[in-house]
Image: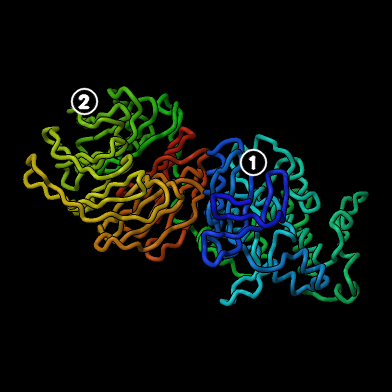
Amino acid sequence: MLLQGRYRLIKRIGKGGLGKTFLAVDEGQFPPIPCVVQELLYETLKSFEQKAQQQQELGKHPQIPALLSYFQQEQYFYLVQEFVVGTNLAQVVEEEGVFNETQVWQILADLLPVLQFISDRHIIHRNIKPKNIIRRIPPNPKGEANLVIVDFSAAKIVTEVDCLTTENSIGSPEYAAPEQTTGKAVFASDLYSLGVTCIYLLTHISPFDLFDIANSCWVWRDYLINKGHKQQDTKHLRLGKILDQLLQNIVSQRFQSANEVIEAMGMEVKSQKSKIVSQNFPWQYSHTLTGHSAMLSSINALAFSAQGNILASTNDQKNINLWNLNTQKVLASLSGHCQAVKSVAFSPNGKILASASDDKTIKLWQMETLTEIYTLLGHSHAVKSVAFSPDGEILASGSWDKTVKLWNVSTGVQICTLAGHQLHVSSVAFSPQGQILASASYDRTIRLWQISCQKLKNCPCYTLLGILSGHTWAVLTVAFSPDGKILATGSDDNTIKLWEVNTGQLISTLVGHSWSVVGVAFTADGETLISASWDKTVKLWRVSTTEEIVTLSSHTDSVSAVAVSQGQLIATGSKDKTIKLWQLVE
């Protein structure tokens, strides 16, 4: 069978409740190269695309097969993945015999960091077993971990709703944790399956036979070769304790994370995030803004006033709410838009607030009197983003009509239109020096514009400096570093990219979110980047090293907005209808 005119299926190598797996060759390459094709059954194209994005993210880890392509053909959906040359551990134990203690220690050391990588992205594999762990042939030439976890067909992204629902049992019964067999899999379920895998490799006995149902306990030690000798080994006793805790039937008595197991083994936890969290993290949760009629719908946008004492928030109720951060109460609600407000921005002196709406208009508000100054008309579609120039004299707006417009703040007159994007413009931002404007678009690009409006005359006032390409999905948000040297962009491809503004060169791609990145912001000192994602999390990154510092996971639904004040306060807004505040504690 030939798919897409290039992927020829050779033989079926797996079958489960969610589909089939085939060994295939990619005839679109010369010479043809082997690959693995999964044929999956999904109800909707959207659910399949989410699965593909999930696999694309996971495939960035060297011990998980990379996703090469995905597509729909007739009623089936297909994932094309890297073919890993090697032997799965079920075959290894058949051919080479039971594993010794040292080999099992190595399996734990190789696979626990991968499971931590998976769970950090809110994903449960749900089918860890010897057949789905491949030992590379030949070994990794770089001396890195030699085991690869395959078959993510049963994997799922965990949401808060999952705590309230039950699914059908999935995975292999011999290796599945008790809670997984009842449709309630958790992150620790994968650790249980890893523990069962280890005792199978130590004994080459079916896990069903290693569990004493009458006494509800594991009896794997009874099947060890040279049992008496091994029980004298203190190192083996420590391995036994770790395996026993991995195999606890009650979830609360089990290891809760792979990092916990790594620490119990006496190994260093290499995850930067784990190191930082264990120290005194300087950003401390401060308050949740709730309990007002303003919070009856999800938050769309946030902005701090220049003084940092007022927070503006928008929602789908068409109004803008101004919060007094000293009292955590709404001091005023501005109404006038006839559709949802999607962006707000304060002028640098804090005297004017700009709001952009799906009603195709932008409004300027006088903060002293809380009255409307102008309604700016000109866009032919929803306006999704507004930004003031550093001197406060120009307002930029980005719209789904594919254009960016510049406005004279003093007069409300349109100065010029920046055209060139092929799809919706999602976000605009001025550099701190005011000479460059960045615009992000669903066309997967960011455009950098040189702005040179002399005395704000109605004349051509811009030059296209360059187009930044690299994101594989829509670019949703942009932000300049305080010194103007770095541009951060967030995308539907779940990544953040850092660009050197002067050259347009890509500095780094930050990977960690498991869903779209919808907001990015730098702290006032430029040392930290904050990112907000639909995966319900906010992440902090160290700009100098591009390492993830910590994940803030307090929201119960998608995070839709993030803002940072000069006074070092972070505000995050979510579809869970709340705003959360985080204060920097020196």
User: Where residue 475 appears, x then y in whole percent?
Assistant: 37, 47
> Residue at 74% across / 73% down in the picture?
103
Q: Does 298 sit above or below residue 107? A: above
In terms of depth relative to the viewer, which is nearer, 312 or 493?
493
Residue 206 lies in what quarter of the image? Answer: bottom right
> Residue at 50% across / 43% down in the picture?
536
Badge 1 marks a residue whose secondary structure is loop
> Residue at 74% across / 57% down in the picture?
129
In terms of depth relative to the viewer, which is nearer, 215 or 200?
200
Which mark is in front, 1 or 2?
A: 1
Q: Does 331 sit above or below residue 58? A: above
Residue at the extreme right: 214
User: Where residue 348 appears, x then y in whole percent?
Assistant: 21, 44
What mark, if any, has residue 41 been given in the picture? 1
Q: Check disc 1 and give the amino acid type.
A: Leu
Q: Check disc 2 and give the amino acid type.
A: Thr
Task: Kindly report the distance in space between the C-alpha atoms of the residues bearing marks 1 and 2.
Answer: 55 Å
Q: Does 364 sit above or below residue 455? A: above
Badge 2 marks a residue whose secondary structure is strand
